């Protein structure tokens, strides 16, 4: 279970980084030739090494960060048309997978609560 959550988090985060770059630079940019929205992938780089190294604290705060990308995906999936709408739906799915994997990983790796010493 822990290994599956780890792999899901790693794969979904890396895929989301590449999706954000490809979306705003090539696939369906807001402006022709790419846009500054490609910089939205930069916050995703902050937790990358902590996620890859299995740091529990990184999984905890990254699960909150990813909610911004989930929100953007939902909004753009309902307002964009064509390829942009499809990419937004993929972003929403990846963000959901990452969130679920982070929550599972953080729960399964928490230190066991020991009874208080008398």
Image (cartoon, grey):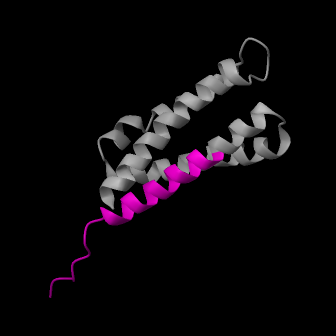
- Tag count in the figure? 0
Q: Looking at this view, name the residue that lies furthest to the top.
A: 33
Residue at the spot 77% in from the left edge and 44% down from the top edge: 77
Q: Is 22 in front, or is 49?
A: 22
Check residue 105 for magenta coloring. Answer: yes
Q: Main secondary structure of the magenta part?
A: helix
- The x, y position of residue 5, in whole percent, is 38, 55
Percent position (x, y) of residue 75? Answer: 77, 45
Q: Quadrant of the N terminus?
A: bottom left
Residue 39 left/right relative to 113: right
Vertically, is 31 above or below 75? Answer: above
Which residue lies at the image location 16% right of the left edge and 83% below the top edge? 117
- The reply, left or right, for residue 116 in relation to residue 80 is left
Q: Please provide the residue range marked out in magenta.
A: 92-118
| Coordinates of residue 11 in the picture (x, y in percent) | 44, 41
Taking depth in this image into account, of 5 and 64 the one nearest to the observer is: 5
Measured from the top left, where is residue 41 in percent x and y? 57, 30
The relative height of residue 24 versus residue 101 in the rendered view (above or below) is above
Q: Which residue lies at the image location 77% right of the left edge and 38% below the top edge?
A: 85
Q: Residue furthest bottom?
A: 118
- The answer to whether residue 64 is left or right of residue 82 is left
Residue 25 located within the stretch drawn in magenta? no
Q: Quadrant of residue 47?
A: top left
Instruction: Name the residue at the left extreme.
Output: 118
User: Residue shown at 14%/88% (left/top)?
Assistant: 118
């Amino acid at each position: 279970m822990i290994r599956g959550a780890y792999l899901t988090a790693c794969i979904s985060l890396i895929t989301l980084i590449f999706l954000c770059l490809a979306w705003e630079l090539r696939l369906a940019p807001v402006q022709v030739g790419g846009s500054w929205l490609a910089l939205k992938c930069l916050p995703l780089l902050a937790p990358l090494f902590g996620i890859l190294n299995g740091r529990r604290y990184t999984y905890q705060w990254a699960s909150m960060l990813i909610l911004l990308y989930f929100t953007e995906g939902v909004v753009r999936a309902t307002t964009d048309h064509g390829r942009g709408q499809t990419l937004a739906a993929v972003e929403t799915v990846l963000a959901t997978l990452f969130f679920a994997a982070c929550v599972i990983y953080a729960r399964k790796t928490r230190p066991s609560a020991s009874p208080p010493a008398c």
